[in-house]
Image: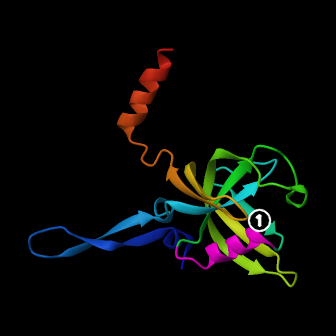
Amino acid sequence: MTEKESEIIINPEEKRSDSAGSVDKEIVLAADYLPDVLPLLPVTLRPAFPGMLLPVILPAGPYAEAASAAASSEYKAVGIVLTKEASSSASMSKPPELFSYGSAAKILKSQKTEENNVQLLLATLKRFRIRKMLRNAPQFVAAVSQTWPHRSPLLIARWHRRFLKL
């Protein structure tokens, strides 16, 4: 399968297009087909932005378990969120405080090491906003909403008019 083909998903919901009963399938990009609930991976020091490829090594523990579960799920997606305090995961006595925005990422490759660490190759796709934290510790899970889901010309023009008047 080529790189372009792996970015396209045939939507399982079929639409009827005419009275003759022919069935058309809607084609959507993989980036537009993300879940509303994501396991979160907190990162320190460097934020992740859409369009980045990130190699990640997670030490054995709750984050590695969450990443392994996400890698074997239907969506193969995680959320990457920057922590408000820069500290190592080994020195955290309490769960880190997270910013309210992050980047959704597809897990392209996942591999467990002999020490039970998890190595991931992530492709960040879209920004999201955390609507509600569903689980705080030891694994973060949040209900999210995508920011700028459709960049319609009308919406962008309205935004420009509003902010260019300042």
The amino acid type, in three-letter code, at marker 1 is Pro
The structure residue drawn at horizontal position 73% and vertical position 64%, both measured from the top left corner, is 138
How far across and how far down the image is residue 61, in percent? 80, 72
The structure residue drawn at horizontal position 86% and vertical position 85%, both measured from the top left corner, is 114
In the rendered structure, the answer to whether residue 159 lies left or right of residue 44 reads left
Q: Residue 94 appears in which quarter of the rendering?
A: bottom right
How far across and how far down the image is residue 160, in percent? 45, 26
How far across and how far down the image is residue 83, in percent? 75, 48
Q: Is residue 75 magenta?
A: no
The span picked out in magenta is 61-74
Q: Is residue 66 visible?
A: yes
How far across and how far down the image is residue 59, in percent? 84, 70
The structure residue drawn at horizontal position 38% and vertical position 38%, both measured from the top left corner, is 153
Q: Residue 155 appears in which quarter of the rendering?
A: top left
The structure residue drawn at horizontal position 44% and vertical position 29%, both measured from the top left corner, is 159
Callout 1 crowding tier (Cα within 10 Å): few <14, some 14–19, many ≥20: few
In the structure shown, which secondary structural element does the residue marked by tag 1 occupy?
strand
Q: Is residue 50 visible?
A: no
Q: Is residue 66 magenta?
A: yes
Toward the viewer: 162 or 146? Answer: 146
Q: Say which residue label 1 marks.
A: 55
Toward the viewer: 118 or 137? Answer: 137
Q: Residue furthest left?
A: 19
In the image, is residue 19 above or below residue 134? below
